[in-house]
Amino acid sequence: MARNDVFIGHLAEVPLFSALSRKELGLVARRAEDVKVDAGRVLVSEGSSGSEFFVILEGTAKVSRRGRKVATLGPGAAFGELALLDKAPRNATVTAETDMELVVLGQREFGGVIDEVPGVARKLLTGMARRLREADAHSVQ
């Protein structure tokens, strides 16, 4: 249960999920899986289609684009949330730099939440609008 509470806290910080209630976040968290990976494992590959969303509980990961490191992600960081909505190609490669513990949510499991509580879809649109606004603000700077 403690892992679930930690995951709910991290989910609440993800712009896509920001409009969801704690109860709705709990539904999402219950569909997720706790996964441990070894250092060096590629979690997502740039250009490949994806269907999972990740939250880092422990460890660090390297984000690279076109073979160049662009960021390091640590505990609390989330990536891949757009893959829950669309199987478009990933825009970066994420590789475990250290042994890691992740919470992983698949597109199919997430779809089950939407089917179970259709009102979540409207709230996701609100979160998506926030994300688009942020991206737009960064592109103007």
Image (cartoon, rainbow, N blue to C red):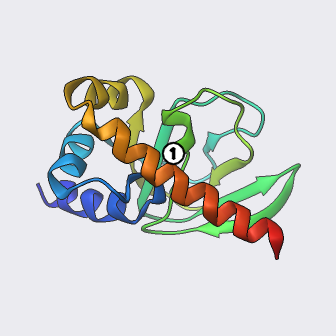
Number of other residues with Cα within 10 Å of mark 1, as a class: few under 14, some 14 to 19, many 20 or more:
many
Please, is residue 48 above or below residue 71 in the view?
above
Q: Nearer the viewer, residue 108 or 38?
A: 108
| Amino acid residing under circle 1 | Glu
Tell me: 114 left or right of 92: left
Please, is residue 67 above or below residue 13 in the view?
above
Q: Position of residue 107 (x, y in %)?
A: 44, 28
Q: Position of residue 21 (x, y in %)?
A: 21, 55
**Quarter of the view holding residue 106:** top left
| Residue ID at (37%, 59%) | 18
**Quarter of the view holding residue 22:** bottom left
| Residue ID at (39%, 66%) | 13
Q: Position of residue 47 (x, y in %)?
A: 78, 33
Q: Nearer the viewer, residue 42 or 132?
A: 132
Please, is residue 129 above or below residue 31 in the view?
below
Tell me: 128 left or right of 123: right
Q: Position of residue 140 (x, y in %)?
A: 82, 70
Quadrant containing the C terminus is: bottom right
Quadrant containing the N terminus is: bottom left
Secondary structure under badge 1?
helix
**Quarter of the view holding residue 105:** top left
| Residue ID at (36%, 26%) | 111
Label 1 belongs to which residue?
Answer: 81
Tell me: 114 left or right of 117: right
Task: Note whether residue 35 is visible.
Answer: no
Task: Note whether residue 110 is visible.
Answer: yes
Tell me: 114 left or right of 90: left
